């Protein structure tokens, strides 16, 4: 729940920022000189890119959460079997062991979105966020019946 609140607060702050930046772009365009109109258009591009990026990330998170809920309802969510340090951090060797098992499961069932979901969690636990995201995108594509994008 804390992660959802943090995401919502961050998204709201970004939207406020986009509005402020957009209003400055409009003011520059209203000034009417060639340079201010050019800068105004350039400034307006930033919130558009930011809103698109925020929208795509929000869609990704919602789809991943839907998969997690479905997998939880089936009783197939990965169990947290990782050892932790005294400070609460995941033990690297433990994460590597779990990752090796998840990778083997995914190689045995490459068209099963569930195995890709669990692999994404293992990548995340191993602190490999880019690969975790790609594995989750593949799980989402497989669940939706779309051909997964090749890496």
Image (cartoon, grey):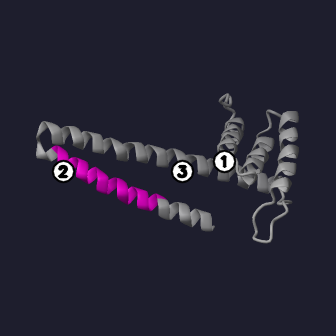
Sort mark 1 into few (<14), some (14-19) or many (20+) by Cα contacts within 10 Å: some
The location of residue 15, given as percent across then percent down, is 40, 56
Quarter of the image with the C terminus in it: top right
Residue drawn at x 18%, y 50% is 27
Q: Is residue 4 above or below residue 150?
A: below
Disc 1 designates what residue? 129
Disc 1 is placed on an element classified as helix
In the rendered view of the protein, which quadrant contains the N terminus?
bottom right
- Please report contact status of discs 2 and 1: CB closer than 8 Å, yes or no: no
Separation of disc 1 and disc 3 at Cα? 17 Å
> Depth check: 86 or 51 in front?
86
Q: Is residue 12 left or right of residue 58?
A: left
In the rendered image, which quarter is residue 134 located in? top right
Q: Which residues are magenta?
A: 11-29
Checking the image for residue 52, the label placed there is: none
Whether residue 17 appears in magenta in the rendering, the answer is yes
Label 3 or label 2, whichever comes before in sequence order: 2
Tag 2 residue: 27
Q: What kind of element bears circle 2?
A: helix
Residue 80 appears in the picture as rendered: yes
Does residue 88 sit above or below 97 in this rendering?
below
Q: Magenta includes 25?
A: yes
Q: Residue at x 47, y 58 (%)?
A: 11
Instruction: Give the distance between the C-alpha atoms of the residues marked 2 and 1, in whole angstroms.
Output: 39 Å
| Picture quadrant where residue 100 is located | top right
Q: Would you say residue 75 is visible in this rendering?
A: no
**Which one is closest to the eye, mark 1 or mark 3?**
1
């Amino acid at each position: 729940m804390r992660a959802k609140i943090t995401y919502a607060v961050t998204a709201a702050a970004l939207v406020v920022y986009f509005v402020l930046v957009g209003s400055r772009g409009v003011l520059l365009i209203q000034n009417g000189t060639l340079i201010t109109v050019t800068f105004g258009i350039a400034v307006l591009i930033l919130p558009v890119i930011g809103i698109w990026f925020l929208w795509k990330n929000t869609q990704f998170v919602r789809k991943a959460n839907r998969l997690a809920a479905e997998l939880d309802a089936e009783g197939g969510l990965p169990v947290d079997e990782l050892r932790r340090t005294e400070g609460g951090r995941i033990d690297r060797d433990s994460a590597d062991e779990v990752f090796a098992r998840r990778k083997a499961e995914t190689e045995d069932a490459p068209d099963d979105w569930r195995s890709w979901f669990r692999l994404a969690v293992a990548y995340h636990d191993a602190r490999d966020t880019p690969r975790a995201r790609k594995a989750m995108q593949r799980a989402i594509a497989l669940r939706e019946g779309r051909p997964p994008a090749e890496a």
